[in-house]
C-alpha cells in the first residue's frame, strides 16, 4: 500500500464503525432516490451483509450459552430466566399501551380511503403459531436440525441442557480423570469459539458499511419518495411511540431509575446494535452485534446475556407489538369504524402473543397483523396500505426491539450482580474495531 492510501485507510478506520454505518445509511438513501432503478442492482451487496451476520448467529448462541452454564449454577439460571421473561412480557405490554395511547391521540388513518388499499393486492392471511405450539417448539426434536434451521428457541434449550450436563458431569467426575479433563477442554474450546465469533462480528461490521449503503440505495430505488410521503401520520405515530418507549421505559425507568446509570452511556454501549437493527430490519440478524455490545461495551456477564439476548431476539418484540396496536387503530380509522375500548384490550392481548410468536426477521409484523386484524374483525386487505412504507417502519420497530432486549438484559445483570460497571462504556470506553490490534482484523 502506498503511504497516502494507507493514511486514508487509517483515517477511515479511526472513525467509529457506528458513524461510518450511519453515513452509509444516509448516503445510500440519497443515491437510491437520485439514481433510481439502476441502484436496485446493489441489492446483492446488502443481502451479503445480512448473510454474513446470520452466519454467526447459531455458533455465537451455542458457544456463549454453554459458557453460561459453566459460570452459573442451574438454580441461578432459573432465577435469571424468570426475571428476564417477566420483564420482557411487562415491557411489551407497556409498549402496546403506549402505542395505543399515542394512536388514540394522533388518530392515524383518518382521511385515507380504503379503496386505495383494495386496489392493491390483498395480503395472504397466514396462521400464526398458537401459544402451545410456541411453547412446545422450545424443545427441539433434533438439536442439529434446530441449528440448521436457525430455530433459536430450540438451540437455546439444547445448548443450555448441554452446558448444564457438562457441569454436572464435571462435578461428579474425579478431578484429573479423563472425563473431568474432557469437560474442561470442551469448556475451553467453547470459550475460544465465542471469542472467535465476536472477532468475526467486528469484521462483518466493517463490510456493513458497504452492505448498509447497498440496502438503502436499493430500497429507495424501488420505492421512491412517495413511500415516505403517503403515510406520514402513521410514520409519526410509530416514531413518537417508539421515542416514548425508549426514553421513558428503557432509558429513564430501567437504566436511570433501576440500574442507576447514565442513559447516554447505555446508548453508547448499544449503538452498534441499534444502528445494525435500523439497517437490516432483523433483530435475529442483529443478535451477534447485540451480544457483542452487551459483552464488550456494557460489561454484562455471559451468564446473563447469552440467555437473555437470543431469547429476546426471538420473543421480546416491543416495537413490533406496539406497531400491531397502532396498525389496528390506523386500519379501523381507514375503514371508518374506530375501535372500542374492549376491542383495544383484545388488540393488546393478541399483539402480545403475536409478538412473542413473531420471528425476528424483516417484515414479520405484516404476517402478525393478519392475526390481530382477524381477532378484532378488521379487513386484512387494508394491510396492503401499509406494506409500501413497511421497510421504513420495520427499521424503527426492530431498533426498538433490540434496545428493549439490551435494557432488560442490563437490568437483570445488575440484579444478579452480573455486570461490571468498571469497564466498557461505564468507564468511558467502547471497544470498536479500531481498538482491536491490526493483526487480528486483517488490517495489513
Ligand atoms: N423486523 C422485526 C424484527 O426483526 C420484526 C417485525 O416487527 O417485523 O425485530
Image: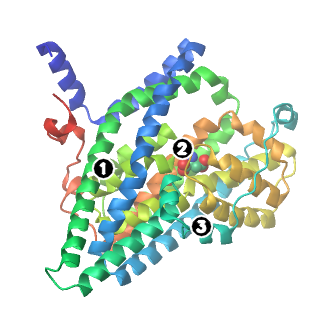
Tally of numbered discs: 3
Local crowd size for mark 3, using a 10 Å CA cut-off: few (<14), some (14–19), many (≥20): some
Local crowd size for mark 1, using a 10 Å CA cut-off: few (<14), some (14–19), many (≥20): many
Mark 2 and mark 3 residues within 8 Å of each other at the beta carbon: no
Instruction: Give the quarter of the image for residue 200.
Output: top left
Is residue 87 left or right of 289 when viewed as pictured? right
Question: Can residue 393 be seen?
Answer: yes
The quarter of the picture where the N terminus appears is top left
Tag of residue 226: none
Alpha carbons under labels 1 and 3: distance apart = 26 Å
User: Which residue is tagged 2?
Assistant: 396
User: Which residue is tagged 3?
Assistant: 137
Instruction: Give the quarter of the image for residue 201.
Output: top left
The residue under the point 25% across, 53% down is 195
Say which label, 2 or 1, has the lower sequence index. Answer: 1
Tag 3 secondary structure: loop
Tag 1 secondary structure: helix
User: Which residue is tagged 1?
Assistant: 197
Report the front residue among 153 and 266.
153
Name the spot of residue 384 as percent of width and height, x first.
77, 38
Name the spot of residue 313 as percent of width and height, x first.
49, 56
Amino acid at each position: 500500500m502506498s503511504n497516502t492510501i494507507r493514511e486514508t485507510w487509517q483515517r477511515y478506520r479511526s472513525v467509529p464503525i457506528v458513524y461510518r454505518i450511519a453515513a452509509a445509511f444516509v448516503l445510500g438513501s440519497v443515491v437510491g432516490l437520485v439514481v433510481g432503478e439502476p441502484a436496485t442492482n446493489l441489492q446483492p451487496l446488502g443481502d451479503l451483509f445480512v448473510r454474513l451476520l446470520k452466519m454467526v448467529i447459531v455458533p455465537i448462541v451455542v458457544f456463549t450459552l454453554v459458557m453460561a452454564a459453566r459460570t452459573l449454577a442451574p438454580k441461578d439460571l432459573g432465577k435469571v430466566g424468570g426475571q428476564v421473561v417477566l420483564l420482557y412480557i411487562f415491557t411489551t405490554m407497556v409498549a402496546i399501551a403506549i402505542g395505543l395511547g399515542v394512536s388514540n391521540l394522533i388518530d392515524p388513518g383518518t382521511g385515507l380511503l380504503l379503496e386505495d388499499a383494495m386496489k392493491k393486492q390483498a395480503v395472504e392471511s397466514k396462521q400464526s403459531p398458537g401459544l402451545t405450539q410456541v411453547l412446545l417448539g422450545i424443545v427441539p426434536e433434533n438439536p442439529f436440525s434446530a441449528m440448521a434451521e436457525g430455530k433459536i428457541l430450540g438451540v437455546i434449550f439444547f445448548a443450555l441442557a448441554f452446558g448444564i450436563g457438562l457441569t454436572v458431569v464435571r462435578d461428579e467426575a474425579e478431578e484429573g480423570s479423563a472425563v473431568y479433563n474432557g469437560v474442561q477442554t470442551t469448556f475451553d474450546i467453547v470459550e475460544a469459539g465465542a471469542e472467535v465469533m465476536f472477532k468475526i462480528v467486528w469484521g462483518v461490521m466493517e463490510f456493513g458499511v458497504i452492505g448498509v449503503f447497498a440496502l438503502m440505495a436499493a430500497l429507495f430505488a424501488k420505492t421512491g419518495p412517495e413511500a415516505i410521503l403517503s403515510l406520514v401520520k402513521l410514520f409519526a405515530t410509530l416514531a413518537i411511540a417508539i421515542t416514548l418507549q425508549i426514553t421513558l421505559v428503557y432509558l429513564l425507568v430501567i437504566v436511570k431509575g433501576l440500574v442507576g446509570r447514565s442513559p447516554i452511556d447505555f446508548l453508547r454501549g448499544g449503538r452498534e446494535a441499534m444502528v445494525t437493527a435500523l439497517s437490516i430490519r432483523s433483530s435475529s440478524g442483529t443478535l451477534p452485534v447485540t451480544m457483542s455490545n452487551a459483552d464488550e461495551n456494557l460489561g454484562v456477564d455471559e451468564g446473563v446475556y447469552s440467555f437473555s439476548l437470543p431469547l429476546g431476539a426471538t420473543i421480546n418484540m416491543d416495537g413490533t407489538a406496539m406497531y400491531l396496536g397502532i396498525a389496528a387503530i390506523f386500519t379501523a380509522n381507514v375503514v371508518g369504524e374506530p375501535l372500542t375500548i374492549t376491542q383495544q384490550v383484545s388488540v393488546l392481548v393478541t399483539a402480545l402473543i403475536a409478538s412473542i410468536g413473531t420471528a425476528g426477521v424483516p417484515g414479520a409484523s405484516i404476517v402478525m397483523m393478519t392475526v390481530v386484524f382477524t381477532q378484532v374483525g378488521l379487513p386484512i386487505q387494508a394491510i396492503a396500505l401499509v406494506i409500501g412504507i413497511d421497510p421504513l417502519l420495520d427499521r424503527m420497530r426492530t431498533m426498538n426491539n433490540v434496545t428493549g432486549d439490551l435494557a432488560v438484559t442490563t437490568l437483570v445483570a445488575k440484579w444478579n450482580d452480573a455486570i461490571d460497571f468498571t469497564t466498557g462504556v461505564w468507564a468511558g470506553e467502547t471497544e470498536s474495531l479500531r481498538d482491536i490490534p491490526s493483526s487480528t482484523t486483517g488490517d495489513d
